[in-house]
Amino acid sequence: MCSSFSLKTVLLNLAILVQINGVVSASNLPTDQVALLKIKSKITDDPHGVLGSWNDSLPFCKWLGVTCGRRHQRVTSLNLTGKGLAGSLSPFIGNLSFLRYIFLDENQFHGSIPPEIGRLSRLQNISLISNFFTGEIPANLSSCSKLRELSLYRNKLSGKIPNIFSSLQMLKIFDLRRNNFTGRILPSIGNLTSLEILYLSRNPLGGSIPDSLNRLKELRELGLAHNGLTGVFPMFSYNLSMSEFTWELLIQTEVHIAFS
Ligand SMILES: *[C@@H]1O[C@H](CO)[C@@H](O)[C@H](O)[C@H]1NC(C)=O
Ligand SMILES: *[C@@H]1O[C@H](CO)[C@@H](O)[C@H](O)[C@H]1NC(C)=O
Ligand SMILES: *[C@@H]1O[C@H](CO)[C@@H](O)[C@H](O)[C@H]1NC(C)=O
Ligand SMILES: *[C@@H]1O[C@H](CO)[C@@H](O)[C@H](O)[C@H]1NC(C)=O
Ligand SMILES: *[C@@H]1O[C@H](CO)[C@@H](O)[C@H](O)[C@H]1NC(C)=O
Ligand SMILES: *[C@@H]1O[C@H](CO)[C@@H](O)[C@H](O)[C@H]1NC(C)=O
Ligand SMILES: *[C@@H]1O[C@H](CO)[C@@H](O)[C@H](O)[C@H]1NC(C)=O
Ligand SMILES: *[C@@H]1O[C@H](CO)[C@@H](O)[C@H](O)[C@H]1NC(C)=O
């Protein structure tokens, strides 16, 4: 009795979870669970065994680092900060359509940031600090119009900073420090009118600092050090004696600040 029940369970699991070329294909599982299993399958090193909990014995909403909304069992947050994970980030993350937060700081992710993230219209925060992501920032992140934080500090990203600014009206934190971004800062950055923190330091950028930075009335922190930026700093209408306004500007740049 007991053994025939477990055999049935095994057969059921086999029917649901079919291994094709080492890739999990699971037609009857919820989309979010499939996506999480695909994400797990791209992780090649998990030194603390945190993804061991991502198994059938627990509902996926209880998997470590996963948070779901209360009403619907849909993933709203993925937080795997500091778990020592190595591997790439599966494009299936773009199927977690209720996702609001992605926190993958301090791991060893490599490969590109999947453009499928552009499908996540509810996304508010993306933090991938201290990883080894390469390639460009996907231009279609501009579809994530609720984005408040895009923190990509300390990766190996390159290419031009895409023009994703006009649609990201809620962005408050934009941190691209310590990457390999080239090209110039587009004047359209001045369309990020909610921006409070802008760090572009330590990238081989060039060109001048756009006057449009002047339009960022909420800006409190600005980092432009260790860049190839040249020219005159735009006249600011901020009250620069405000204590929280920190400057990390002049080191190794040819920028001159002109205040009036
Ligand atoms: C599945 O996850 C649970 C909860 O973390 C854990 O206790 C159990 O050992 C895991 N099972 C396997 C087969 O890894
Ligand atoms: C992410 O999880 C870690 C615990 O692993 C916690 O310390 C941290 O506060 C969480 N981050 C956020 C933004 O919730
Ligand atoms: C999820 O995403 C992948 C790759 O982005 C796609 O091929 C797949 O059809 C999507 N849908 C479901 C339901 O898994
Ligand atoms: C962004 O690009 C990916 C890959 O090309 C695609 O799957 C996704 O639907 C795009 N997102 C938007 C909002 O266009
Ligand atoms: C997401 O970013 C916003 C805007 O900077 C910030 O206020 C908020 O604390 C972040 N949320 C989390 C959970 O870290
Ligand atoms: C930065 O990108 C350039 C190509 O644009 C490449 O030659 C160089 O090796 C990259 N540097 C780092 C540190 O990744
Ligand atoms: C964005 O900024 C550019 C340059 O500053 C400007 O020409 C353009 O009209 C702005 N677009 C929107 C949608 O605000
Ligand atoms: C500028 O900030 C200082 C310190 O917060 C304050 O004392 C001063 O009144 C402010 N000036 C203006 C013009 O807002």
Image (spheres, rainbow, N blue to C red):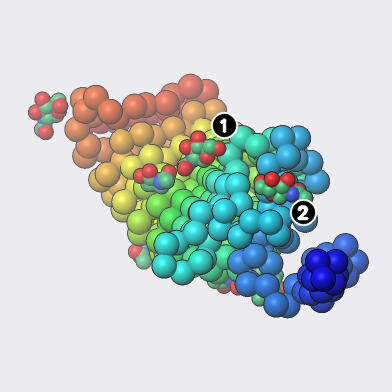
The image quadrant in which ligand 3 is located: bottom right
Q: Quadrant of the N terminus?
A: bottom right
Residue placed most toward the observer, 204 or 255: 204
Q: Secondary structure at mark 2?
A: loop
* Residue type for callout 1: Arg
* Residue type for callout 2: Lys
Label of residue 42 in the image: 2
Question: Which residue was labeled with disc 1?
Answer: 202
What residue appears at the point 46 percent right and 69 percent down from the top-left corner?
72
What residue appears at the point 66 percent right and 59 percent down from the top-left corner?
36
Task: Let me know if residue 111 appears in the view.
Answer: no
Image location of residue 74, percent across then percent down: 52, 66
Instruction: Give the answer, above or below, for where 103 lies relative to 77.
Output: above
Q: Is residue 49 left or right of residue 71?
A: right
Give the mark nearer the N terminus: 2 vs 1: 2
Q: Are marks 2 and 1 in contact (CB under 8 Å)?
A: no
Residue placed most toward the observer, 114 or 53: 53
**Badge 1: how crowded within 10 Å, few (<14), some, or many (20+)?**
many
Q: Quadrant of the C terminus?
A: top left
Q: Residue furthest right?
A: 21
Mark 2 or 1, which is nearer the eye?
2
